C-alpha cells in the first residue's frame, strides 16, 4: 500500500467527486475519460497529450511501481496485471483523502459513496444531483400534479441523508437563472409541457429554477456547476457572474451556494465569494485539467476568494487515477503557492499552514457539518 | 515618523483615493473596511483572512512599531494607543505619496482632500463624483427644468476647481452606455420621471449618460469605475469592453477617459488603452485586494497597456492602512515585475526605471496637468 | 546573414502572417505599424513604449549589428543605411521560419507569399481572406445573382491553390454567427441589399455566414480571427466562446476551424480546442504584443489546449521586424515554459521536446497538409 503524502496537510475532504469504474477500461475508454470531449481525438492527436494526461503520467505510474512518465502502454499493461480492484485501492490510498462527498447523479457501473471511500480508506457521503432526481421522479409519476408533489417530497427526503445538492443548470440552460422562483401556476404549466414533450432531459428554465428553489429551502449547501465541462455547455453561459441576481435573492436564506470548478471564470467566482457571505468557491476540475499550471490557477483563485471560502475537490470520475492526480496536483500547487508567498515575506509561515488546512479540509468540514475530522 | 521607501521612485501620485475616518474604528468597523462586502463575514470566517488582510498585517504593524504579521488584536491595541490622528500621520507618511486626488463623493465623517494630504505630507486635489453631484443638485431644486439647469451649472462650476470627474455608472446601470448622448426632450422626460419617483439614487440610464456628457464637455479627465467593487454591481456589467461604443463616440473630443480598477477585466481595459489614444487604465483596487498576487496582476496590466497610459492609485477609503498597503503593494509588485524583465534581458535597466517613474507619477502629472512634481 | 537560432526546434511554420512593406518606412509609419491603433499616440506617449516596442528593441538591433535596446533613432538610421531589401533579408532570415502561410487579403504595397518567403529562405503558401474575395467579386459583377454565382466559383477556385481560408467576421459583425447557414432566398435578399447600398465593406451577417459556409464546404482549414485586433472590433464580440453554436454545427463536416490570436479569451479558445476535435488554436498576435509576458500568456494557452492542437504564427504585417520578434518571443516563451515544467518534474524532457516540435511546426504540417517539412 502506498501511503498518503506526508506534507503536513490533514486528510483531504474531497467535497465534489464521482464514482469510478468497477471494470478494467480499454485503452480507448481510458483515454476518453481523460477529456471532457465526447468525440474521438482529432486525427494525429491523442487525449493523453494534454496537461491532464501528462499529470497522470507523472503521478500514477509510481503508485503502481513504475517510473514517472513511462510510456502509456506500459502503464496500461501494469494496470491490467493488477486488476481493477487492486488498482483502485492503490490509487485511492495514495490520494490521502479522508472524506469523499460523492455526486451520485451520473449513470454507469460506478462505485457509490461507500465503495469509493472504502477503497481509499475514508468515509463517503452523498451529494444528490437535482436534475437526475427530477428526471427519475418524472419516470415514476403519471402527471404534472403528481410529479411536482413527488418531486417536493423527493428533495425533502434526499435532504435527510445527503450532505449537499448539486445542480447542472449550467448545462441545461445556462447560469442566468431568474432571481426569484416561478409561481405555482407557471411551474405547473412548465411541468405539463415537459412531460407532454416526452423528453428525458430536463432543460426547462422554469423547472430548473423551481428545482433549485426546493433545494435552497432545505438549507443544505447547493453545489452549482460553473465554468468549463463537457461540450454540452456553452462556456460563456456558465460564467458564475451570471448568477448575481440569484445570489442576491438567496443571500438571506442562510443556504450556502458552492460554485464548482469556475475556470476560466474563477476570478469572477472569487469575487462573488468575497462579497456574498453565503457563496463559496471550489478549485475542482480546474487544477487536475491544468496540471503543470495548477499552481498558477490556484494562485488566481486565491486573489479574491476569502481563505475561509475555498474548497478542495478532485471532481474525479470513472478513473481512480483522477483521485490520485487531483490530490497530488492540488498538494503540489498549494505548496508551490504558499512557499512562494512565505519565502517573500508576504505571508507568515503560521498563516500559510493555517490557510492550507482550511482549504484542504477545514472549510469543507465547517460548511457541510462533517465534525472535527477523522 | 516613518520615512517613505527609498526605492528610486518619485513621490507617488495617487490619482484615485478617498478620505479616511477621523475617529478610531471598532474592530468590527475595521474588518468591514477590508472588504467590498456589505454584510458580516460568513460563520467561522474573517475578513482579515484575505489577501488584503494579510497584506495589511505585513506592511502596517512595522509602521506602528510592531512585527509584521503580528496578531490582529495586538495591532488594533497599538492603533488605539496611538489614537486616530497619530495613526493616520504615521501610516500616510509611510506611503510616500506626494499627491492625492481625492474622490469626495462618498458620505461619512471622512478627511477631505486637504486633510488627507496633510496627514501624509502631500498635496490634495478634488475629484468630483458625478452621481453624488446630481443627487445633491436634485435635492436643492424644485423641478426637472430647474434641476437640469442647475446640474449643467454645477458640472461647469466643479470643473473650475476639480482635477477630474468620476462616474459610477457601472454600479447604477452597467457600462453599456449609449454611444451618443440623449436628446434634450428625452433628458427632460427622464429627469421628470426620476424626480417624480422620489428616489435618492440616480440609476436612470438616460440621466447617467447625460451627466457623463456634461463632464466630457468640460475636457477634464473622466474616471470611470470598471470591474469589481462592492456588491451593488453586477460584475459582468462592469466589463470595460462594454464601453467600446461610448469610447469610439468620444475619441475626437480630446477628453481623456480613465478606466479605474478594471479587475478581472484588466486585459480588456488594457486593450482599450492600447487602441484608443484618449483611454487610460488604473491599477487601483486590483493590487491592494490581491496582495501577494499583485505582481502577477500588474504584469497582466502591462501586457497591452501602453506604458505612458497606466496610472497608480490606492483607492484607499476609510482606513489610512489602505494607503500604506496600496503604496507598498504597488512598489513591491512594480519592482518584482521590472526586476524579472531586466534580469532576463527583456527590458533594459534604463527603460525599466523610466517606465517605473511614468506609472508611479509622471503619467498622472501629464494627464491631470499637475506640473512637474513636488 | 544572421543564422536562425539553434534551439533544437525545426524550421518554424508560420501559419498566419502577412506581407511586408517593400519601401523604407518613415519613423511615423514605423511606429504606426507597432500598434493596432489607427490614430496617433496620445500626447506625451509613444507606441514604442509598449511590450511590442521593447521586444523589437531587444531582438532586432543585434540582427542589424547594433546593441539590444539601443535608441530607436539609431535603429532607424541603421535600417535606412541598409535599405529595405537587405533589412528584410536579415530580419526574416534571423526568424528561422521555413514555411510562411500568408494572408493576402490586406491592401498595400506588400510582399506576396513567394516574395516574403524568399527573403527568409523559406516556402510561401497563400491563405485567402473571404471578405476581401467577396468584396473583390462584388466589384466585378452586375447583380446579386451574378455576384453569388461568381462568389461560389471564386471560393472553389481559391480552394484549388490556397492552403486555408480566413474570415474576419469578428470585425464585421462579431462571432455570434448563426449555427446554420442561411437559406437561398435569404442570401439573395441580403446580397441585393448590400449591392444596392453601394458599400464596399461586407458586414451583413447573412452574407458573412454564407461566405463562411462556402469555405467550410471546401474542407480547407478555416482561420477565424478571434480576440483583440485593431479598433474596428468590439472586443467582447470577438470572444471565441460566442462561436459555440457554429462550432457544434460544423463538428461533422471534417473541416478544421483555427481560432487565431484569441487573447484575452485564449482560455476560452483552449476549451473549444479541448472538446471539439475540429477546433485548433493559435498563439498569434498574443505573444508578440505581450513581449516580456509571452511566456505567461503561452502557459495559459497550454492549460487546456491539447498539445496536438496549438499552432505558431507571428501575424507579422508591414514590418519584417514583426517576423523576427514573433519568432524570438515564441522561442523564448516556449523554452521558458518547458524548462520550468521539466525542471520541476511535471513533464519529462522527451515529452517537452516532442511537444515543442508539435507547436513549432508539426501540428501545422499535419493540419495544412504541408508534408514532412523542408
Image: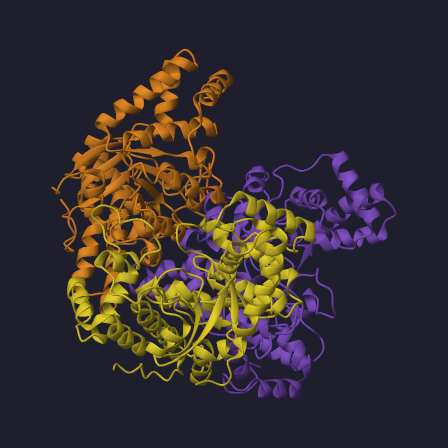
Chain colours: A orange, B yellow, C purple
**Residue drawn 48% across and 61% down?**
B267
Q: Is residue C65 left or right of residue C182?
A: left
Q: Measuring from the top left, give residue C74's x and y in whole percent.
A: 58, 88
Q: Position of residue C345 (x, y in %)?
A: 28, 60
Residue A116 on image: x %, y %:
21, 34
Q: Is residue A241 above or below residue C283?
A: above
Count the marks: 0
Q: Quadrant of the N terminus of chain A?
A: top left
- Relative placement, left or right, of C55 versus A357 is right
Q: Is residue B260 visible?
A: yes
Instruction: Find the residue positioned furthest to the top.
Output: A142
Q: Nearer the viewer, residue B94 or A266?
A: B94
| Residue at x 40%, y 54% (from the top left corner) | C303
Identity of the residue drawn at 64% across and 68% down: C317
Residue nearer the viewer, B231 or B271: B231
Q: Quadrant of residue C75?
A: bottom right
* Residue that extends furthest to the right in the rendered view of this protein: C142
Above or below residue C66? Residue C275 is above
Give above or below for B232 relative to A220.
Answer: below
Q: Horizontal and vertical percent for residue C95?
A: 55, 72
Name the residue: 56% across, 59% down.
C228
Quarter occupied by the C terminus of chain A:
top left
Q: Is residue C229 visible?
A: no
Would you say C332 lies left or right of B69 here? right
Amino acid at each position: 500500500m502506498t501511503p498518503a503524502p506526508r506534507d503536513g496537510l490533514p486528510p483531504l475532504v474531497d467535497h465534489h467527486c464521482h464514482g469510478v469504474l468497477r471494470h478494467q477500461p480499454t485503452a480507448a475508454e481510458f483515454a476518453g475519460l481523460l477529456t471532457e470531449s465526447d468525440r474521438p481525438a482529432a486525427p494525429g492527436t491523442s487525449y493523453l497529450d494534454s496537461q491532464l494526461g501528462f499529470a497522470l503520467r507523472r503521478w500514477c505510474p509510481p503508485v503502481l511501481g513504475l517510473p514517472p512518465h513511462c510510456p502509456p502502454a506500459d502503464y496500461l499493461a501494469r494496470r491490467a496485471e493488477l486488476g481493477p480492484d487492486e488498482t483502485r485501492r492503490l490509487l485511492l490510498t495514495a490520494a490521502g483523502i479522508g472524506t469523499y462527498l460523492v455526486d451520485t447523479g451520473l449513470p454507469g457501473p460506478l462505485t457509490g459513496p461507500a465503495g469509493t471511500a472504502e477503497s481509499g480508506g475514508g468515509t463517503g457521503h452523498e451529494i444528490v444531483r437535482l436534475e437526475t432526481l427530477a428526471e427519475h421522479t418524472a419516470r415514476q409519476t403519471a402527471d404534472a400534479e403528481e410529479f411536482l408533489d413527488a418531486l417536493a417530497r423527493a428533495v425533502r427526503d434526499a435532504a435527510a441523508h445527503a450532505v449537499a445538492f448539486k445542480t447542472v443548470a449550467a448545462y441545461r440552460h445556462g447560469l442566468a437563472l431568474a432571481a426569484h422562483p416561478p409561481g405555482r401556476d407557471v411551474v405547473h404549466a412548465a411541468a405539463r409541457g415537459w412531460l407532454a414533450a416526452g423528453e428525458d432531459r430536463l432543460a426547462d428554465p422554469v423547472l430548473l429554477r423551481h428545482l433549485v428553489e426546493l433545494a435552497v429551502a432545505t438549507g443544505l449547501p447547493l453545489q452549482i456547476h460553473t465554468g468549463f465541462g463537457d461540450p454540452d455547455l456553452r462556456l460563456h453561459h456558465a460564467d458564475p457572474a451570471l448568477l448575481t441576481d440569484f445570489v442576491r435573492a438567496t443571500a438571506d436564506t442562510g443556504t450556502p451556494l458552492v460554485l464548482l470548478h469556475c475556470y476560466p471564470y474563477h476570478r469572477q467566482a472569487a469575487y462573488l465569494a468575497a462579497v456574498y457571505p453565503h457563496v463559496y468557491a471550489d478549485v475542482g476540475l480546474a487544477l487536475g485539467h491544468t496540471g503543470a499550471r495548477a499552481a498558477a490557477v490556484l494562485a488566481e483563485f486565491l486573489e479574491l476568494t476569502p481563505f475561509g471560502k475555498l474548497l478542495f475537490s478532485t471532481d474525479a470520475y470513472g478513473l481512480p487515477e483522477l483521485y490520485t492526480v487531483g490530490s497530488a496536483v492540488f498538494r503540489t500547487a498549494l505548496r508551490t503557492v504558499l512557499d512562494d508567498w512565505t519565502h517573500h515575506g508576504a505571508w507568515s509561515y503560521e498563516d500559510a499552514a493555517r490557510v492550507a488546512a482550511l482549504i484542504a479540509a477545514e472549510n469543507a468540514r465547517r460548511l457541510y457539518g462533517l465534525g472535527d475530522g477523522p
